Amino acid sequence: MAKNKPAAKPAAVPAVHPEIRPGQSVELLKELHILTRDGQLNQDSRRKLKQVYHLYQFIEPLLAEVLADTGDLSLADHGAGKSYLGFILYDLFLKDKPAGTLYGIETRAELVQRSRELAERLGFPRMRFLDVSVEESTRSEVLPEHFDVVTALHACNTATDDAIQFALAKDARFVVLVPCCQAEVASVMRQNKNASFGKTPLSEIWRHPLHTREFGSQLTNALRCLQLEAHGYQVTVTELVGWEHSMKNELIIAKRTGQPRKNAMQRIEAILDELNLAELRSRFAC
């Protein structure tokens, strides 16, 4: 009589990592490549996880404030890409709440479809994904007339400005930005460099190509902050994480107060004139 074969051992369950918060979706962390396919953390993923949790530490109080005040929450992740941030926010905050909807706005249809499939697979019913342009997103009937929170994580170049325009159009209560690859202002500075030398001695700040890039990036974010202040927002600028973790490190948080800074728009105009950047007036002085 043949002996019964021993029952197959169940697949090993990855050990719980102390770095991962209780209740967080392991499948989601794998999809975002924070965990490896076998549920492990490597050095790069630990760094990525630290950035995620640090950003969440800034955003969570804003979400809690809105939900406590209104009993509901609408959040738009603009220029969402793979909706990395949106999924993390839903998983850590909205998943166990009775209300609140998160919208991912992205122009690349294949990324939108991938996000829809992932949300369905994870059982995240209050996530919506739209394949629309910036102009369409501000007037789409599918989107709410107003948003409580607008985020943009590493939205490259002018995509951060698009998120700001969307937030202003939607009268957002909070705006959270981690800008990335601010090339437009530096490009205009580069094009106008010779004329700028005769206009202002400040052109020495961006005479060298490396300085053009670095100063252009800093100037871009300074103009964005002034623009938000001109529209009635109180702005805070801080580091996202230590420089050893990310060079894309600037975090801009804006809270609508309804009290515009009186001289903000005049400052924008003066800076653009002084630095020979008048052609950018339509982007920042509006």
Image: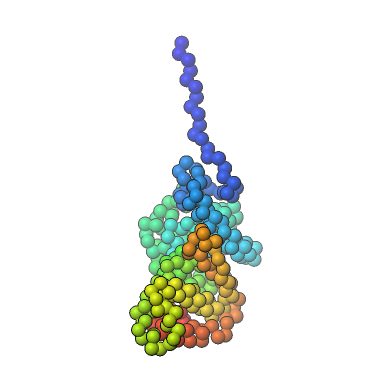
In terms of depth relative to the viewer, which is nearer, 166 or 226? Answer: 226
Report the number of discs.
0
Res 26 visible: yes
Give the residue at x 52% y 51%: 46
Seen at 47% across and 20% down, the residue is 5
Q: How is the image coloured?
A: rainbow
Depicted 105 relative to depicted 123: above or below: below
Question: Residue visible at 42% across and 60% down?
Answer: 81
Q: Quadrant of residue 240?
A: bottom right
Compare residues 72 and 213 and report the one nearer the observer. Answer: 213
Check the image and name the residue furthest to the top: 1
Question: x, y (%) of residue 191?
Answer: 34, 79
- Say if 20 sits above or below 186 in the image: above
Residue 67 visible in the displayed image = no
The furthest residue to the right: 68
- Residue located 39% across and 85% down the image: 196
**Res 89 → quadrant:** bottom right
x, y percent for residue 206: 42, 78
Above or below, 14 relative to 260: above
Between 167 and 22, the one nearer to me in the picture: 22
Find residue 269 and report its horizontal and vertical position in percent.
47, 85
Q: Where in the figure is residue 280, as x and y percent of width and height?
A: 41, 80
- Whether residue 210 sits left or right of residue 261 in the image: it is left
Up-down relation of residue 122 to residue 271 (above or below): above
